[in-house]
Image (cartoon, rainbow, N blue to C red):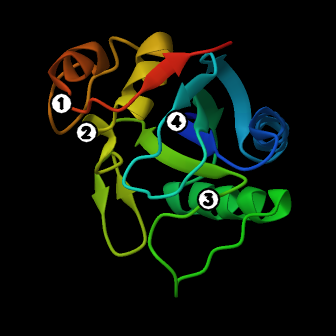
Amino acid sequence: MKEHDVFLLQGSNKENKKKYLDKSLILMSKKIGKIVKISSYFESEAWNMKNYSIFYNRALHIKTNHSPIDLLNQILNIEFLIGRKRNSCTEHYQDREIDIDILFYDRIIICNFILTIPHPLLHLRRFVLEPLCEIAPNKNHPILNLSILEILGLCMDKLYVKKIL
């Protein structure tokens, strides 16, 4: 079975944020695959949210045997196990114990109603680009054909992002 290179972003803005990131990392190592690289923790303002707590984010490079859809299902299961409740009746962005986004899966491009890879907003979000640049500055975006470092240099997002640990 072929191993795939996957880049993910963890985020939390509820209670003990670091605990939620660490707990989800343990579950990902058991259910998704081998953790290759982990960024530092980054503290950031919430993107497109009102009345929020500060987020902790971290980027991960993982080797997995899961297909993109299987990977998404594993991620949703991990989020559920950690306590995330998804409510489609409320605003799109809300406080959460854990959020895990698929940023890249090899160099593939997927765009359907279930899954979009690369993540469609990653190039606009400094809270994604800073931790991702720490672990994969030369990773090439398969649509933009720019490195993460180049995309970060062009990013217009001025929200607060700071490496903390």
**Drawn side of residue 142 relative to residue 162, left or right:** left
Camera-near label (4 vs 2) is 2
The secondary structure type at the circle numbered 4 is strand
The secondary structure type at the circle numbered 1 is loop
Which residue: 47% across, 12% down? 134
Q: Outermost residue, front direction? A: 51
Question: In the rendered image, which quarter contains the N terminus?
Answer: top right
Camera-near label (2 vs 3) is 3
Point out the tag, 4 or 2, that comes first from the N-terminus.
Answer: 4
Q: Is residue 1 visible?
A: no
**Pointer 4 and pointer 2: residues touching (CB < 8 Å)?**
no
Point out the tag, 3 or 4, that comes first from the N-terminus.
Answer: 4
Question: In the rendered image, which quarter contains the C terminus?
Answer: top right
Q: Mark 2 belongs to which amino acid?
A: Leu
Mark drawn on residue 95: 3
CA separation in Å, label 3 and label 1: 24 Å
Q: Is residue 63 above or below residue 77?
A: above
Q: Mark 4 belongs to which amino acid?
A: Val
Residue under pointer 2 = 124
Residue 90 image offset from top left, x and y in percent: 51, 81
**Drawn side of residue 137 relative to residue 81, left or right:** left
Which residue: 35% across, 75% down? 113
Q: Is residue 93 visible?
A: yes
Point out the tag, 1 or 4, that comes first from the N-terminus.
Answer: 4
